[in-house]
Image: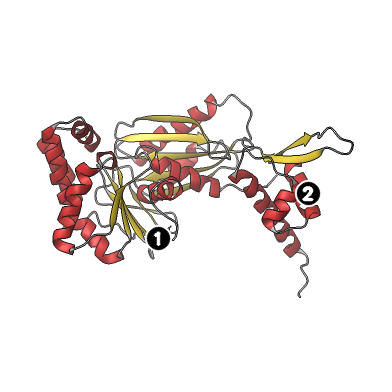
Amino acid sequence: MPQIIGSDVSSLRHVNRDGALQHLRRTPDTAFTASDIADGLGLSRPTAARLLTELSESGWATLQLAHSGSAGRPTRTFTVNRRRRLVAALDLGANNLLAAVADLSGTVLRRHYAPHGHPATAQAMAEAAARAVLSLLEEETEAHGGLSSVVVSLPATVDRTGHILPWIDSPAWATDELPAAFGGLLAGLPGVSLHFEGAPLAAAEAELQHGELHEGEDAVFVLAGDITGVAPLVEGRPYRGATGAAGAIGGLDSVDWRAATAAVLRETGFSTLDDLVAAGLAGDTDAVAELSRYAEHLAPGVEVLIRAFDPARLVLGGCLAPAQDLVLGPLGAALERTLGSTPSMVCAGVDHVDAPMLGGLSAALDHVEWGTP
């Protein structure tokens, strides 16, 4: 067996320390002993005890002493220090901005949701986003270790190198100038890492964690809204493709989701699809009929996805999800006429307003430098 020497020892300790902290974080309300961590990670008890002591001394874990009432030393238990660092996520939508700050357990501490006024430039959107994040941090009066990572989702493709590739119907501010502009405005926050993600992939991650997408399953997630995007999943993980643009079919003439959305809003007089769905759910028969027609307009694009990825499940998210059978019924009927059969079709379980934000927070936690001083 080869010896582990030098930097390998340091790397192994870092991996083990990270594993111990992640074990604490997954169940933040549970107090763990060194034996618990040793059993969970396959370590010796002395090694686990040493790791937990290091995490406690560096502020990542909280030590508690439990007295049994009998003679002897009290039992040492540990929980994650949720406020050692904070994370943030922003969902920059076609019409609204949602920002949230969470602790290390993923619990949302503060949130801001409001129309963003359709900024004309990336700089203007960056300023609105920075104001939202900074104001949420200022509202956090309890002590914390600062902001560690921020994930921003937006209606565009983000390639594997982090560059923003606008869709044909992306807002004017969704350009590759946004990361530098936003990062510059957060420069006063030490140690913050900034990451961008396409909204469909962020929402799909939330659906994997909390909703109708299942680990190990081939599926297609459609984030329907004023701008509609897609996240294909292969064996339960989002499939990005070579450049990160897998599923970006909204601009195809044969799909033409842009025209369908514009047409239904123009014909009904509603400002957004959210308003149309609300009217349909309230029993407005005209709105119900328009939702049915709109679902049929979605069908050609969904058919392309089904034929390309052959998914076991299709999950409809975004603002159409609350409409449930008002949309799934006509969409399924349209697909059966061309496909003969359809995969399992359900509406998303995660609230469409929160989905990209929750997925962003999950990704932001993945970017935390766990266990560092």
Q: Position of residue 224 (x, y in %)?
A: 27, 46
Q: Is residue 227 visible?
A: yes
Q: Residue at x 40, y 46 (%)?
A: 211
Q: Residue at x 15, y 50 (%)?
A: 296
Q: Earlier in the sequence, mark 2 or mark 1?
A: 2
Q: Amino acid at mark 1?
A: Glu
Q: Residue at x 70, y 50 (%)?
A: 37
Residue lying at the far bottom in this picture: please name it. Answer: 1
Q: Position of residue 12 (x, y in %)?
A: 71, 60
Residue 127 position (above or below residue 324): above
When asked about the image quadrant of residue 65, the answer is: top right
Choose top left, top right, bottom left or bottom right for residue 275: top left
The image quadrant where one finds the N terminus is bottom right
The residue carrying mark 2 is 49
Reply above or below: 331 against 136: below
- Residue farthest along the front direction in this orientation: 70
Q: Quadrant of the C terminus?
A: top right
Q: Amino acid at mark 2?
A: Ala
Give the camera-side residue of 130 and 341.
341
The image's mark for residue 217 is: 1
Q: Nearer the viewer, residue 194 or 200?
A: 200
Q: How many other residues sit within 10 Å of disc 2, few (<14), some (14-19) or many (≥20)?
A: many
Give the residue displayed 30% in from the left and 49% down from the top: 346
Nearest to viewer (mark 2 / mark 1): 1
